Amino acid sequence: MRHLLFTFLISFISYSQINYQPTQDNLAARKWFEDSRFGLFVHWGVYSVLGDGEWVMNQQKLSIDEYEKLPSFFNPIDFNPKDWVKMVKDAGMKYITITSRHHDGFSMFKTYQNEYNIVDSTPYGKDVLKMLADECHKQGIKIFFYYSTLDWHNDDYFPRGRTGNDIEGRGEGDWNNYISFMKAQLTELLTNYGPIGGIWFDGHWDQKEWDPVTKKYGKDMVDWHYEDIYKLIHSIQPACLIGNNHHLAPIPGEDFQMFERDLPGQNTTGWGSSKEDIGDLPKEICETINGSWGFNLRDRKHKSSKELIHYLVKAAGYGSNLLLNVGPMPNGKIQPTHIKSLMELGNWLKLYGETIYETRQGPLNPNVNYVSTQKKNKVYIHFLNSEQTNYEFNGIKNSAIKSIKYFNSNLDVEYSHSNDILTINLNKDIIDEIDTIITISL
């Protein structure tokens, strides 16, 4: 009966909503999203058992039969959603985005579409997403669900894409069945877990042609049915924000644009979004604390507190949120080094959060030495190079300046203004090793 209900609901919604326009609730959610500026990304699944990242199925070329043994070892008895949410709040974060289903096809929630999920296939037998969502609602943290459009396990993900082709045991199925499967799972996520902040799609790039010479994406190899899928989401929860990690310009129906391991417009990875693809939607960049998204025992690339603060500040200076990732261990605990980093960020935000939260990109073009943020009549300049004391800016008229002071201080900043050029001279005795902030009152 439940399957029939989902089928009817999906069919009705998919073809009854035309020319979607954001509701007032959706627009309010977009503003909240931009104001929040900082969230937690969580990559967690049965892959954590092997301690080799979330792509281990593809990287180690594990067969379907081999990988299907992992759920029997996944028993996160130390998972405590209350501790997770408290950690998020102490870190100064406003929302959590957690993997509901990654590329391995295993669902971290109770789904009625197959038994390949945490409730039906693990000794733990509990819905961790339900537990976490309930705690988020209780403590005032919004929850977003990451959802992979790519699936190395489902036979109906066919034709296959550019990854996972060395995985033995993958069968051939029907793409239309796969689209129906995704719609049914998304309906479950949007009806069984209370108000959802957003859906974070990933995997589109697997079905894009790719030119390794020009490093450009070509045409789509499949029809993703985004019009139907996006209508489905907005029809069930109009305020639910939609983002898609496709590395392209925003697609109609999306509510925010994300950038993977890159500041907007800086395609340092070679496969990210180009500058001309930046849209007008709220922005979010995602990055890891160390080098991996999922739990990796051998990952020694832990970023320093200074590096993480600079990433948060630069994100805001580019008009973007920062979604900072942790990869929980298979027992359900967050790595202690990750908790320590998050607490250091939280302590910094207690002092300087005014220059990050509820701000928008400032009037100065950001670069490696400084960025600016703005809130109403205040411009905050973050100086990230502790060795430099003299700066020249073009973009702030002298007639508009009422005062320039060191942040949270009555100390005046030495400055001059000539021919529309603002010259700032920082006091070397006041410069902060991590971030020297000044406030320009307009």
Image: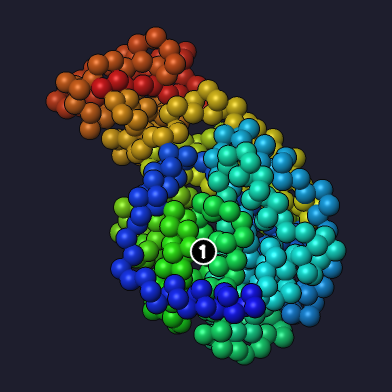
User: Residue 107: x, y in percent?
Assistant: 68, 67
Q: Residue at x 25, y 16 (%)?
A: 402
Which corner quadrant holds the N terminus? bottom right
Residue 6 is situated, as x and y percent measured from the top left of the image, at 57, 74
Q: Nearer the viewer, residue 430 or 356?
A: 356
Residue 406 picture quarter: top left
Q: Indicate left or right for 54 with 65 as reference.
A: left
Is 405 situated left or right of 75 in this image? left
- Residue 162 visible in rendering: no
Relative to 252, say whether 152 is above or below: below
Give the SS element for disc 1: strand
Where's residue 24, x and y in %? 35, 50
Q: Is residue 404 above or below residue 298?
A: above
Residue situated furthest left in the rendering: 419
> What residue do we see at 28% from left, 35% from top?
363
**Residue at horizontal 47%, vertical 58%?**
237
**Disc 1 residue type (three-letter):** Phe
In this rendering, is residue 159 above or below 206? Answer: below
Q: Nearer the viewer, residue 377 or 232?
A: 232
Residue 119 shows in this picture: yes
Depth check: give the residue in front, 332 or 49: 332
Residue beneath disc 1: 201
What colour scheme has been applied to the protein in the rendered image? rainbow
Label 1 Cα neighbours within 10 Å, binned few <14 / some 14-19 / many ≥20: some
Residue 22 percent across, percent down from the top left: 35, 57
Label count reads 1
Q: Vertical placement of 372 versus 117: above or below? A: above
Task: Give the position of the C terminus as an image quadrant.
Answer: top left
- In the image, 436 versus 140, the foreground residue is 140
Outermost residue toward the front?
A: 1
Q: Residue at x 23, y 32 (%)?
A: 394
